[in-house]
Amino acid sequence: MCNAIKDSAQWGALFDLDGVLVDSEGIYTRFWHDIDLRYPTGVPNFEYVIKGNTLRTILDTYFADGETRASIVEALKEHEANMEYVLFEGVVDFLSLLRETGIVSAIVTSSNSSKMRHLFAELPLLRSLVDEVVTEDDVSYSKPHPQGYNVAASRLGLSPRRCIVFEDSMAGVEAGRRAGGAVVGVATTNPAERLLRFADVVVNRVADFDITTAEELLDSLNR
């Protein structure tokens, strides 16, 4: 997107990927559940604890053995190579509406560039509807660190405080909050009641968010 359009944007929309735009979070939950059965970490609800973290952080934190790490990386590569990526209902219409109204957007994901190439090959329309993509390869710290959202806001030419973050994981909600943005919790992975404790607004899916309320939400954040 050209800088002139970016400069005219009133606010920016920053989206997590899995569980927010793409209906794949349940598939990853099952994958990491099976990994924990195969290589027990001793962490209760491991598959939920790690949500929002990059693969690098997961491996560094929970799997010290080199052979185990290599096995997990290969299993994940095979898993992602065979995944079918499906957008949540309403995502295309919502992103199209943002584009039509001059609102810039970015995906901020813990996935790496290899996975994203595969995903965008399957869903080219998704890539065409967002202005920037921030992946694991662009940051040094996983969510809940705010770096990913700060990088995305900077690329869009906006202050994070002029951005609305859409997240389904608790780590992601915290990352958006720490970045200084308004946070919309998407209740696909965590129940709405839990998200409401930390997010400014909670919706069942991204398409349920009313963009006419964006300025009011951001104004309340910046008072």
Image: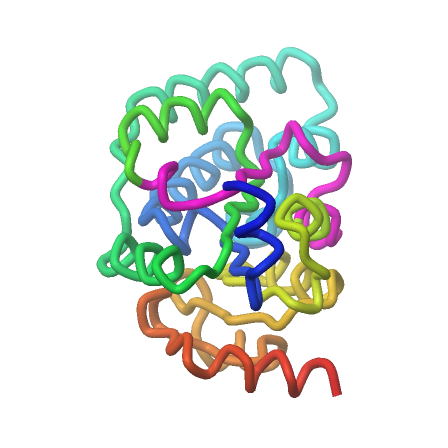
Which quadrant holds the C terminus?
bottom right
Q: Position of residue 168 (x, y in %)?
A: 48, 61
Residue 1 versus residue 89 in the image, above or below:
above
- Tell me which segment is drawn in magenta: 126-148
Q: Position of residue 18 (x, y in %)?
A: 43, 47
Residue 3 versus residue 144 in the image, above or below:
above
Residue at the spot 40% in from the left edge and 53% down from the top edge: 19
| Count of numbered circles in the view | 0
Q: Position of residue 82 (x, y in %)?
A: 29, 22
> Residue 96's quadrant in the figure?
bottom left
**55 and 109: which one is in front?**
109
207 sits to left or right of 33: left
Residue at the spot 57% in from the left edge and 52% down from the top edge: 6
How is the rendered protein coloured? rainbow
Residue at the front extreme, as displayed: 4
Q: Position of residue 46 (x, y in %)?
A: 57, 47
- 131 inside magenta stretch: yes
Residue at the spot 56% in from the left edge and 46% down from the top edge: 108
Residue at the spot 41% in from the left edge and 40% down from the top edge: 28
13 sits to left or right of 80: right
89 sits to left or right of 221: left
> Residue 56's quadrant in the figure?
top right
- 107 inside magenta stretch: no
